[in-house]
Amino acid sequence: MKCKNLTYEKIDITDGFWKERQDLVREVTVWNVYKRFKETGRFDAFKLNWKEGEPNRPHIFWDSDVAKWIEGVAYLTAKKREPELEAIVDEVVDDIERGRAEDGYFNSYYLQIEPQNRFTVRDRHELYCLGHLIEAAIAYDKATQKGKLLSLVKDYVTLVKRVFMEENAAAFEAPGHEEIELALVKLYDYTGDRQYLELAAHFVNRRGQKGKPNQGWAQCNRGYEQDHLPVREQPEAIGHAVRAVYLYCAMADLAQRLEDDALKAAAERLYRNIIEKKMYITGAIGSTRRYEVVKAPDEPTVSYFGEAFEEEYELPNDSSYAETCAALGLALFSRRMQLLSPADASYADTVERVLYNGFLSGMSLDGKAFFYVNSQEIDLEARRRMRKFGRSERHYPTERVEIFNCSCCPPNVVRFIPSVAEFLYHYDENTIYVNQYMQSDADFGATKLEQSTRYPYDGAVSLKLTGESKTLAVRIPAWCKSFAFRHNGKPVTLPCVKGYASIPMRDGDVLELDLAMLPRRIYANPNIRANRGKVALTYGPFVFCMEGVDNGERLGEVRLTDGDVQVGFDPTLGLPVLFCPAVRETATELYTDTLTQTPFTAKLIPSFAFANRGESDMRIWHEKV
Ligand code: FUB
Ligand code: ZN
C-alpha cells in the first residue's frame, strides 16, 4: 500500500493553537472575506450580467478567489454545517449552471468580456481558475453530498481534455499559472477516473516542450512560468514562486501515482534547491519583488520576473516578496514530498516551519486582515528616506489590509486553516507517522489515535491508541535536541532514525513525549549576504522577531549580546515571548572610534504575530555584539 495522508474529515482538532485559529476562520475570517468579495463584485461576476461602465469590472482570476473561498466553506462544513454559507455557495453553483457555455466552459471574465478569446492567452488564468473550481467542487461534494458543482466542473474538464489533449486546439499547451495539474490529480483520487490523472500528466509533460510560441506578459518569458525546460530537466526552482510550488506539487503527486522515478528525482531536486538555498528562515519563499528581466548569460533566456525565486542565497530581508500563497504552497509541496520518502521527517520539519511562521504571518491575529507580501524586515526610517526622494522601489507593506486588488491570499488562508489537520499524519498498512502536534482525535478506521498536547506552547504530547495495533513513528523536530518518552507510564528509549522515533503500540497504549523547548540562537549560511554576522532566535517551532513597539524604533541600532535568553508569556498576544540581553548602539558623530552602548533587555515575539499593533520596525535577523 502506498503511503497516504489522513484527510481532514477523519481528524477533529479539538482544542489549542490551531483550534483557536479554525474557530477564528469560521466566525470571522470567512465572513470578512465574503463581505469584501461581495463589495468588490467577485460573487456578482458569476451572474454574468456586468455592463461596460459599471463598477467592479470582472477580472481574469476572480473565479479562483471565490473557488478557494468555497473550498474553505466546504472544509468548515465538513465539521459543522453552516446553512448561511452553504446558501451562498449554492447560489454561485446555480449561477455557473445557468451561465456556462453549451460545451461546459465557464469563466466569469471571458464569458462576459472576451468570449471569442477563450484559450488564446496562456497566462490569463483560465485553467488556474478551473483548477481551483475542481478543488472546491471535490471538497463541497465530500462535505455536503451536493454533487452539482462537481458535475459542472467534470463537464468543463471534459471540454479541456478535448481541446488540449485530443485536438491541441488552444494557443498554448500548458497553463501559464500552474494549479490545474494538482487539482486533476485530486479529481482522479476522488473519482478513480484515470482520465484525470492522464490529463494532469499531459499538462506536466507538455511544460517546457516549447510546442507553441511563447506568450504571457511582454517582458515575461518561460522561466517565470517554469516553462523554460521539460520539468524532468529543470535544475533549480526559478520564476514565480506560487506557480513553481503548485507545479512541483503535481510533479510529486504524479511521481507517486505513476511510479515515475525521473519525475520523483526532479521533484526532490527542486525541493532541495528551495529548502537548502532559496527559503527564508520563516519558510517564506520568493525573494524578488521588483519586476525585472534577468537574462542568465549561458541559459535560455530565463526571466526572474517579479514575485519570484532569486539566485541561490539571495534572500534580502527588506525587499522580500514572500507571498502568503507561496508559503502555503511550499507546505503543500512538502507534504507531497513526504509521501515519496515516508520515513524521512525533514519534510514535516519544513511543513512546521511554514505553518508556524511564513504562512501564519499572512493573517492578522484577529483574523480580519492579510499580507500578500510578508515583509521579513521593516525599517521605517529606511522607508521614510526612500519615499522622501520618491524612489520607485515598491515599498514593502508594514500593515495587513482587509482585502487588496489581487486577493489570492485571503481565500487561500480561508481554505488552508480549516484543512490544516491534513498535515498531522501519513500512514501505511503497518505504521502511523505522527508529523505535527495538535490536540486532536484521528480515525484510521480500525485504529483511533487521540493526541493531547498544548503544543506549541510546550513540548508535552500524549498519544493514546485504541483498536488495531500499529507502529507509531513520531517526529522529533529538527530543532529539538533533547526529548524523552514514556510508554504506558514507563520511561523508554526509542531509536530515532531520520527524525522519527518508532514504537509498536497496542489497543489502549499511551505514548508520552516530552520535547525540550529551549531558546536557540540560529546563524545563517554566510552565503546569504543579507544575514552575515547576524543571529535569529527560535523557541520550539517559532522563529522570533523584534518589534519597535516593544523595544523602541530604529531597531538597526540594536545588537543582541551573549547571556541567557529568558522565556515569558505575553497575555495580550496570547503567545510565548523571549527576553534577550541587548545593547543599543548610538553615535553623535558620523564616524567615531567609540560607539555608545546602552544595555537593555530586548523583548521578542513569534514572527508570525508582527504588525498586529500598528506600524513598527521589525527584525528577524539581529546584529550581535
Ligand atoms: O496570478 C494568480 C495569483 O495572484 C498568483 O499566484 C499570485 O502571485 C498573485 O499574482
Ligand atoms: Zn496570494
Image (spheres, helix red, strand yellow):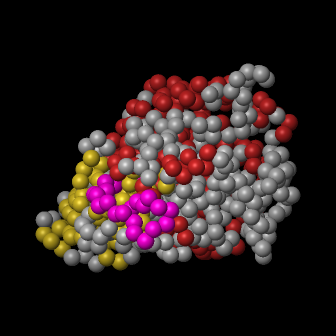
**Residue that appears at 55% across and 29% down:** 36
Q: Position of residue 305 (x, y in %)?
A: 71, 57
- The reply, left or right, for residue 478 in relation to residue 83 is left
Tell me where residue 555 sits by quadrant: bottom left
**Residue that appears at 80% across and 55% down:** 219
Q: Which residues are magenta?
A: 585-608
Viewer-proximal residue, 466 or 570? Answer: 570
Q: Position of residue 257 (x, y in %)?
A: 58, 64
Viewer-proximal residue, 508 or 320? Answer: 320
Tell me where residue 301 sits by quadrant: bottom right
What residue occupies the far left of the structure in this picture? 490
Q: Is residue 254 visible?
A: no
Tell me where residue 174 sits by quadrant: bottom right
Q: Position of residue 115 (x, y in %)?
A: 82, 34
Number of dots carrying numbers: 0
- The reply, left or right, for residue 188 in relation to residue 459 is right
Q: Position of residue 625 (x, y in %)?
A: 37, 70
Viewer-proximal residue, 578 or 431? Answer: 578
Q: Is residue 584 visible?
A: yes
Viewer-proximal residue, 583 or 284? Answer: 583
Q: Any magenta on residue 246? A: no
